[in-house]
Amino acid sequence: MPLTCTRPKERKMPLSVFVLAFGAFALITTEFGIIGILPQLAEAFDVSIGTAGWLLGGFALTIAITGPWMTLMFSRFDRKLSLSLVLAIFAGSNILSLFCESFGWLLFFRILPAFFHQVFWSFAMAAASSTVAEKDSGKAVSIIFAGLSAGTVLGVPMVSFVSVSHGWQAGFILFAGMNSAALIALLLIVPPYAAPQRLSFRTQIWVLKKPELWWSLAVLFLIMASTFCIYSYFAEYLSVAAGMEGSMIGLMLLVFGIAGFLGTLAAGRLVDSYLNQLITGFVLILCLTFALIYGLAHVTPAVVALIVIWGTVHSTGFLLGQQLVNGSASEAPEFANSLFISLGNAGLTVGTFIGGVTIAEAGALSLPLASIALLAVTAAVYFTKRRDRVGVTD
């Protein structure tokens, strides 16, 4: 018998939540792990590095454009079945990529699973939050986001390592293996999960008429734009401003990722009760951190300390944005989660574009100032609406 969204009283986190987090880890490793092997793929398929970059950019663009509508399409199906199908498609597409003889076919099999990427994230977050007590839903969702952080901390370097040692095909074998392992674990451990009632397309799309939702999406968009304006050029900034070289920059990326992983887990324990305070702290701490790193970029110990703070706060933006959007459209949680992923990717894209323009016009040294300006806009939009109108506990 499929589970309903009835919330148990116990506070112990179900094993199924961690299985879903492992699935998230596998998907995010597949999405971003390609970064470490783009030069190899460009050489292997005789294309420019810019063309090879579509293996990442095309993936993200597909998610942003199709995500909400794919989630609506799958909304009538059992959640466990949908999650299993997504993992199977990811595993299969990576296996087929091994046999591609042209870049066009590789790009096709790379982008194919991106159509289903958002279905997994939307259903996984909804399933995780609905299988625990309501007061622990933020903690459950934070575990899913910890899987995301772990993918960037461990998955990306791991893919790069095996590909350098054994060729680009080893990276795709790793992608397929991780998604297959997540699929098996999901089939064995995660129980069937269905919403208590089948929501029609009209019912779900109706939430788009809510001003609170559009306000929340605007805040999410700005959070992503302000953070990725500088983070997308992390290596470039540390090289130009702090004079760091490749190995040191790699170490700083690892430190940043570990700090983000821990920060997400910590925020997950507080987000249900203190969302307003956490978003306020997010904006203020990042503004101060960027101001300090702008003035102290030449002082290596200070930069290292500031990167720890930066990483700890940066990754909580995903969790804060998800809670904000989901709280504005709780009657259609899967659709709200899909909107979160789409607007988050859109904000990431715009922030990266603004950062690129900043570098071209004012130099990499000005990146912290551009992010501060975007954070100021974020704060202005956020505080124009009273928090009690979206049902958030202060």
Image (tube, rainbow, N blue to C red):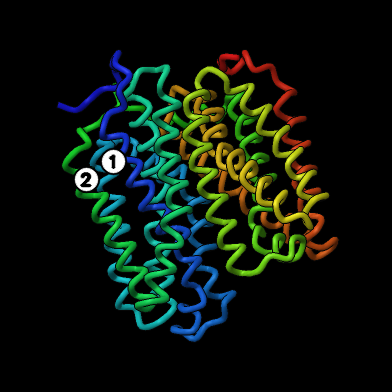
Q: Is residue 282 left or right of residue 173?
A: right
Q: Which residue is mark 2?
A: 185
Q: Position of residue 28 (x, y in %)?
A: 43, 52
Q: Name the secondary structure under disc 1.
A: helix
Residue depicted at x 45% and y 33%: 142
Dot 1: within a 10 Å radius of its alpha carbon, few (fewer than 14), some, or many (20 or more) residues?
many
At label 2, the amino acid type is Ala
Kindly indicate whether the residue at mark 2 contacts the one at mark 1 (C-beta within 8 angstroms).
Answer: yes
Going from the N terminus, do you reach mark 1 or mark 2 first? 1
**Residue 191 visible in the picture:** yes
User: What number is the disc on residue 43?
Assistant: none
Q: Is residue 70 left or right of residue 272?
A: left
Q: Position of residue 369 (x, y in %)?
A: 81, 48
Q: Is residue 365 left or right of residue 75?
A: right
Residue depicted at x 42% and y 76%: 164
Give the quadrant of residue 12. Answer: top left
Q: Which residue is mark 1?
A: 19
Q: Is residue 173 left or right of residue 102?
A: left
Q: Position of residue 382 (x, y in %)?
A: 70, 27
Q: Position of residue 370 (x, y in %)?
A: 79, 49
